[in-house]
Image: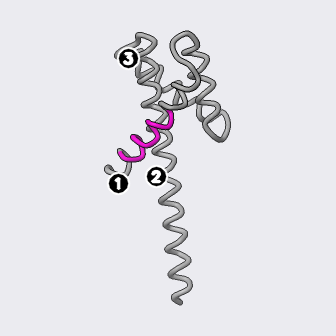
Amino acid sequence: MTTFDDRERAYENKFAHDAELNFKAEARRNRLLGEWAAGLLGMNGDDARAYALTVVTSDFDEPGDEDVYRKLAADLSDKSDEATIRAKMAELRVTAREQILKES
């Protein structure tokens, strides 16, 4: 095996590892968003966990964050505004990424 092959394999492994971390961080962020929104909606316990799961699964509708935003905006229409939701999405993205990096 050549040095080039080793380097190529290392880049492929890093790419796969980074993609996995990003997926886990996005899923964690969405769960945290769901828990935050559930609190605003007055949910707790199993209801809050079930609601958080619906936020996580809403991310599978299309690439990007807009599907998650639309779900939260619809559910929180009388509890929160666009700026607050988007700020919370950004805040929890950082929190989720830090949590995932600590775990790995």
CB under 8 Å between discs 3 and 1: no
Q: Which residue is mark 3?
A: 46
Residue at 49% over, 74% down: 10
The secondary structure making up most of the magenta span is: helix
Horizontally, residue 76 falls left or right of residue 94, namely right
The tag on residue 104 is 1
Of the two numbered discs 2 and 3 on the same chain, state the one appearing first in sequence: 2
How far apart marks 3 and 1 lie (CA) works out to: 28 Å
CB under 8 Å between discs 2 and 1: yes
Q: Quadrant of the C terminus?
A: bottom left
How far apart marks 2 and 1 lie (CA) works out to: 9 Å
Res 96 → quadrant: top left
Q: Within 10 Å of the Cα at label 3, are there few (<14), some (14-19), or many (20+) other Cα atoms? A: few
Q: Which contiguous range is marked in magenta? A: 89-98
Q: Which residue is mark 2?
A: 21
How far apart marks 2 and 3 lie (CA) works out to: 27 Å
Label 3: which secondary element: helix
Closer to us: mark 3 or mark 1? 1
Amino acid type shown at disc 3: Asp
Position above or below: 67 against 10: above
Residue at 41% over, 22% down: 49
- Camera-side residue of 54 and 68: 68
- Camera-side residue of 17 and 95: 95
Label 2: which secondary element: helix
Q: Within 10 Å of the Cα at label 2, are there few (<14), some (14-19), or many (20+) other Cα atoms? A: some
Position above or below: 3 against 23: below
Of the two numbered discs 2 and 1 on the same chain, state the one appearing first in sequence: 2
Image coordinates for residue 81, horizontal then vertical, percent = 56, 19
- Camera-side residue of 61 and 65: 65
